[in-house]
């Protein structure tokens, strides 16, 4: 067994990006009661203001409702509007008791028009009851790491036991946006679904104004109650970087979301630190035709960095390997670290071939035989 050592590879990123930083965001500069913006790939927080404060979140609750429905259900399944779902107050897609829609149609009504009736119908379909579904919501939140979140219902109507934080909600949204079906639904601007008893369909228009006003917007959900105020979960892509953001209790929600996104896109740039085509240094080789072999990481490891910021690649590999060494041979792992926090892990492999040195091997065998 080779004795492993942890060492910082000769790869430290301290690039000075030549872009204008006028108007860069202060870490607490926002009109929202709480806010958080993180980068999709690594989960790195790029902006935070009271992001761990527990607050009501109104219909942004439905991000979790939709995620669970997609993960646990079948989009083609028929969902029935029960008496309980029919009677839910607040925003509605005006389901009639006993009306049937597919799960996908219900999800469109849930996420575009924010139907509380659709939320209740979906919850009963997936969880067997509202209570059962709420239990699933809380369990899924803990799996995601949203430890300061507690759901009391699937739609976000006011309840003292119903709260989250800007950071937790960003984590939940990041998880949801990793699901292709969820992403497709929340980026849909308009849709039509059947309307029982009518000769025309329901016309659904996404309440998220950013989908039409902000270039690169990806979603995801609006919310409002008098207690929670205006709440928004939002996302956007630009120049190879995707951001997920949350503002809670924000009167100018869309304008503030655009301002925060612009600030983070201006301040940070996605930087590839390691990858298959980038050197990760060299490792010593014994009994080889050469004494060293190049290394690389199997997958790209990237991180959003601001001007002058450093990212460190920390490798866990043996001090040496014995020839023969071949490209793709497993050597260890690499961690991408910024300010002591790990933002990515990849497999370190050999990037070139080093054949065994026949003469060295013969000498080693002779010496070993002589000693015996």
Image (cartoon, rainbow, N blue to C red):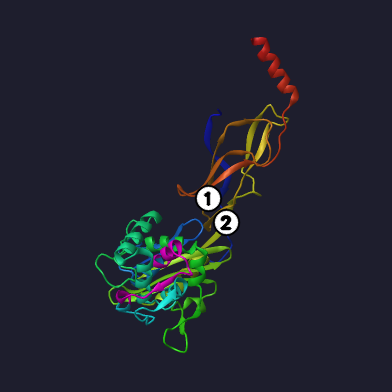
Query: Residue 214's x, y, as percent?
Result: 51, 75
Quarter of the image for residue 362 reads top right
Q: Position of residue 111 (x, y in %)?
A: 43, 74
Name the image quarter holding the N terminus. top right
Rendered position, 301 above or below 204: above
State if disc 1 and disc 2 touch (CB < 8 Å): yes
From this viewpoint, is residue 31 visible?
no
In this rendering, the answer to whether 293 lies above or below 225 is above
> Tag 1's secondary structure?
strand
The residue nearer to you, when weighing 309 against 103, is 103
Question: Residue 238, percent across and down?
Answer: 56, 67
**From which residue to which does the magenta span run?**
64-85
Quadrant position of residue 215: bottom right
Q: Which residue is mark 2?
A: 271
State the SS at label 2.
strand
The disc placed on residue 311 is 1
């Amino acid at each position: 067994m080779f004795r492993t050592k942890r060492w910082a590879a000769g790869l430290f990123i301290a690039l000075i990006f030549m872009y204008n930083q006028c108007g860069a965001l202060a870490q607490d500069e926002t009109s929202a009661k709480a806010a958080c913006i993180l980068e999709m790939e690594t989960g790195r927080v790029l902006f935070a203001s009271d992001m761990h404060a527990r607050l009501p979140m109104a219909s942004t609750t439905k991000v979790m409702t939709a995620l669970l429905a997609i993960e646990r259900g079948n989009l083609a399944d028929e969902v029935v509007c029960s008496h309980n779902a029919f009677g839910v107050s607040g925003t509605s897609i005006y389901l009639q008791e006993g009306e049937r829609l597919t799960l996908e149609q219900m999800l469109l009504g849930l996420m575009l028009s924010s139907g509380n009736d659709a939320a209740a119908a979906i919850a009963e379909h997936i969880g067997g009851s509202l209570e059962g579904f709420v239990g699933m919501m809380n369990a899924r939140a803990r799996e995601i790491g949203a430890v300061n979140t507690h759901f009391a219902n699937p739609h976000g109507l006011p309840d003292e036991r119903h709260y989250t934080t800007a950071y937790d909600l960003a984590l939940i949204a990041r998880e949801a946006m990793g699901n292709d079906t969820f992403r497709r639904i929340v980026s849909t601007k308009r849709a039509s679904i059947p309307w029982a008893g009518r000769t025309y369909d329901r016309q659904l228009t996404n309440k998220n104004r950013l989908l039409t006003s902000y270039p690169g917007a990806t979603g995801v959900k609006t919310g409002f109650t008098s207690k929670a105020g205006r709440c928004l979960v939002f996302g956007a892509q630009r120049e190879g970087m995707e951001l997920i953001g949350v503002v809670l209790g924000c009167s100018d929600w869309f304008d503030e979301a655009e301002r925060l996104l612009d600030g983070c896109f201006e301040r940070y740039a996605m930087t590839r630190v390691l990858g298959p085509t980038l050197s990760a240094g060299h490792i010593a080789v014994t009994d080889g035709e050469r004494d060293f072999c190049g290394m690389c990481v199997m997958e790209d490891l990237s991180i959003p960095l601001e001007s002058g910021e450093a990212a460190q690649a920390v490798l866990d590999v043996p001090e040496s390997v014995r020839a023969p060494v071949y490209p793709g041979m497993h050597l260890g792992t690499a961690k991408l670290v910024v300010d002591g926090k790990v933002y990515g892990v990849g497999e370190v492999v050999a990037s070139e071939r080093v054949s065994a040195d026949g003469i060295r091997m013969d000498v080693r065998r002779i010496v070993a035989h002589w000693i015996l």
